[in-house]
Image: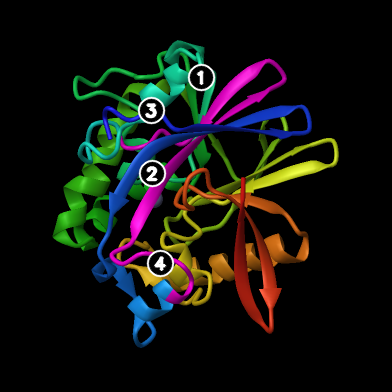
Amino acid sequence: MTSAAAATHPRRVGDIDVTVLSDGYLDASLEVARNLPPAPEALIRRHGGRVPPRISVNTFLVRSAGRRALIDTGSGDSMGPTLGQLPRALAAVGVAPGAIDAILLTHMHPDHSNGLSDAAGRRLFPNAEVVLHENEIPHWFDDAAMARAIESQRIRYFGQARQQIAPYRDRVREFRAGEVFPGVTAIPIPGHTPGHTAFLIASGNESLLVWGDTVHIPELQVPRPEVTMMFDTDPDAAARSRVRVFDMAASENLPVAGMHLHFPGFARMTKSAGNFVLVSES
Ligand SMILES: [Zn+2]
């Protein structure tokens, strides 16, 4: 992966440039899934997926009204050699980290926010503000929630979230909903984490819904939205948000993009005989 070409993919949304920047991929085990139907492997294969699932990690550069935002930062150097490719992808499209004005976070999990800061506690995006839902940081700084979490998540999730955000503490902008960057509207979709957020990018009569972690394994959770992940903060709420986002994307025929849709991650949601069907496009 380190010798491969940086993976980037441009798209236009009206006057806004959206470029997918791949942070890489990870090979996951179905052991992270909960509430599985019988024979999940067969279901995944029937929908064209591989087992064990290979999960893309995508980030998005948004250039709008003369400003530059990144939606999520990938995993930095915290998750092994198949990930942490965002800095190379950003360089490949000719954008310096110091030219990023804002980082819009869908949520704080290692594969989304560990690219904010380096191990020495320096900002990797020295001039950026961090923009995220008001419920996100309080959750990761909640000692009681940390004590309730399973042991493997205490350092990996709570500890690293605290560490990653620290160098930005005087430049955090929190929102509830609404426009957070020119042409970009925040839509809270809580459950996966308390502040999990989708971003609707719109310009002219075009739009694109960047739906964060609405799905982790598309071939499983599109046909079976009730399947949750062991790292969902509130699995029932995550499943409800997933169906709400699917319904919105299908009924409004919205192009969607996802952090864990297969690179480059553009698709449309349709409904066939009562079942959701995701059709990839690029
Ligand atoms: Zn994720």
Q: Is residue 141 visible?
A: no
Sequence-earlier tag: 2 or 1: 1
Tally of numbered tags:
4
- Amino acid at circle 4: Asp
Residue 112 highlighted magenta (yes or no)? no
Residue 50 highlighted magenta (yes or no)? yes
Magenta-drawn segment: 46-75
| Front: mark 1 or 3 | 3
Residue at horizontal 45 percent and vertical 76 percent from the top: 46
Q: Secondary structure at mark 3?
A: loop
Up/down of 96 relative to 217, above or below: above
Q: Secondary structure at mark 1?
A: loop
What residue is disc 1 on?
93
Looking at this view, is 195 or 93 the one in front?
A: 93
Sequence-earlier tag: 2 or 3: 3
Horizontally, residue 152 falls left or right of residue 167, namely: left
Q: Position of residue 251 (x, y in %)?
A: 76, 66
Give the Cα distance between marks 4 and 2: 15 Å
Give the Cα distance between marks 4 and 1: 37 Å
Give the Cα distance between marks 2 and 3: 27 Å
Determine contact: label 4, label 3, CB under 8 Å: no
